[in-house]
């Protein structure tokens, strides 16, 4: 059964601290390796943090040898109730600089809290002094990270990394998402409103809209996922892009389909048209915000395309 920190002896506290420092050091090394290509300056900072944690580990091991001998028991984080845990960042397909910096701040704060709490659990003067020194140094790590951040800003490296991060976000999330949203919002207009004007019943328009939205979402998702493996283009994992594209395609079509849940056909039409206007406005804004398209130009292109498809649907449904 897991024990609390208060139940541990001085030897067990040192063993736990050694394991924790080793794990934190490996996390910094893994993060540095993952971002070395895209964010080289951040990778250097992470490598320096790894070296600091490795130094802590060596000092803890030396103290353990002097006090308790050569054998260090394996005591892991999960063996102690309420002990600090680490997020598995390795599972994140996209790892941004801001995410890494936030994790560093959290890790250092939690480590300092552990050492401060551990000091009260031992009466050995040498052990208390080492734990106190490490607690103070963990606090300095945050300051060191801040200094590195300021140095990166001054050298221009931080700006380059931020630009690189933005480009990755646009390539891997915004572009497939925007393609899906545009396809879902525009391509489903014709079948939805054709069914609405042909039958003058909300139920029929709703069923056609749902079928068109889901079908388009599945089709666009598979098409995006199979279009590029992302290795050379830098567009990221195919599964992620396909999922984003498919979901936003479905959302784009369902948006102006849901109003046809309203039994009153004429009211449903008014609400659906209003939703279409909002959808087209959102698409124009995203193109302006992330694709550097002038807002008026983006709005004109989207509105013209949407209007043409809308008219086609009305003409076919009224024929």
Image (cartoon, rainbow, N blue to C red):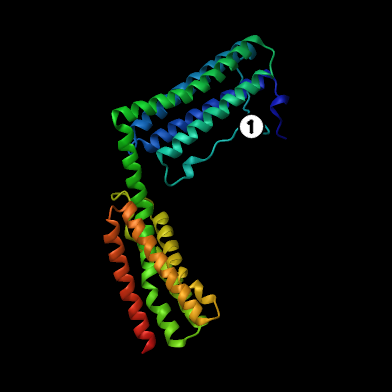
Q: Position of residue 146 (x, y in %)?
A: 42, 26
| Picture layout, residue 197 above or below residue 307 | below
Viewed as shown, does residue 127 lie left or right of 137?
right
Asked whether the viewer can see residue 207, the reply is no
Asked whether the viewer can see residue 24, the reply is yes
Residue 233 vs residue 317, the one in the foreground: 317
Which quadrant: the N terminus?
Answer: top right
Give the residue drawn at x 47%, y 69%: 254
Residue 286 vs residue 60, the one in the foreground: 286
Give the residue drawn at x 48%, y 25%: 142
Q: Quadrant of residue 306?
A: bottom left
| Picture layout, residue 6 above or below residue 123 | below
Give the residue drawn at x 64%, y 14%: 68
Q: Hey, which residue is sitting farthest bottom in the picture?
A: 319
Residue 292 vs residue 129, the one in the foreground: 292
Q: Quadrant of residue 61?
A: top right
Which quadrant: the C terminus?
Answer: bottom left
Q: Position of residue 284 (x, y in %)?
A: 34, 60
Give the residue drawn at x 35%, y 42%: 165
| Picture layout, residue 127 above or below residue 31 | above
- State the SS at label 1: loop
Q: Position of residue 112 (x, y in %)?
A: 57, 24
Task: Give the crowd class for mark 1: few <14, some 14-19, many >=20 residues within 10 Å.
Answer: some
Q: Which residue is mark 1?
A: 83
Q: Position of residue 238 (x, y in %)?
A: 38, 55
């Amino acid at each position: 059964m897991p024990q609390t920190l208060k139940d541990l002896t001085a030897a067990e506290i040192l063993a736990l601290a050694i394991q924790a420092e080793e794990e934190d050091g490996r996390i910094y090394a893994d993060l540095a390796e993952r971002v070395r290509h895209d964010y080289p300056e951040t990778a250097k900072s992470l490598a320096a943090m790894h070296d600091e944690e490795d130094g802590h580990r060596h000092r803890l091991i030396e103290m353990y040898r002097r006090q308790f001998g050569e054998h260090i028991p394996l005591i892991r984080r999960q063996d102690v109730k309420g002990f600090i845990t680490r997020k598995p960042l390795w599972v994140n397909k996209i790892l941004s600089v801001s995410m890494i910096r936030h994790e560093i701040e959290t890790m250092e704060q939690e480590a300092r809290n552990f050492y401060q709490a551990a000091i009260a659990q031992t009466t050995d003067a040498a052990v208390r002094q080492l734990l106190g020194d490490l607690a103070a140094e963990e606090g300095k790590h945050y300051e060191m990270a801040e200094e590195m951040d300021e140095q990166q800003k001054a050298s221009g490296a931080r700006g380059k990394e931020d630009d690189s991060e933005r480009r990755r976000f646009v390539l891997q999330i915004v572009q497939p998402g925007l393609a899906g949203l545009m396809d879902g919002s525009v391509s489903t207009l014709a079948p939805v409103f054709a069914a609405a004007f042909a039958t003058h019943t909300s139920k029929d328009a709703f069923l056609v809209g749902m079928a068109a939205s889901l079908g388009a979402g599945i089709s666009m998702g598979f098409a995006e996922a199979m279009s590029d493996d992302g290795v050379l283009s830098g567009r990221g994992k195919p599964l992620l892009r396909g999922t984003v594209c498919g979901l936003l395609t479905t959302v784009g079509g369902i948006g102006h389909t849901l109003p046809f849940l309203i039994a009153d056909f004429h009211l449903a039409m008014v609400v659906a048209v209003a939703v279409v206007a909002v959808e087209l406005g959102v698409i124009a804004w995203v193109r302006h915000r992330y694709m550097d398209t002038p807002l008026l130009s983006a709005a004109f292109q989207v509105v013209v395309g949407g209007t043409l498809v809308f008219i086609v649907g009305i003409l076919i449904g009224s024929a």
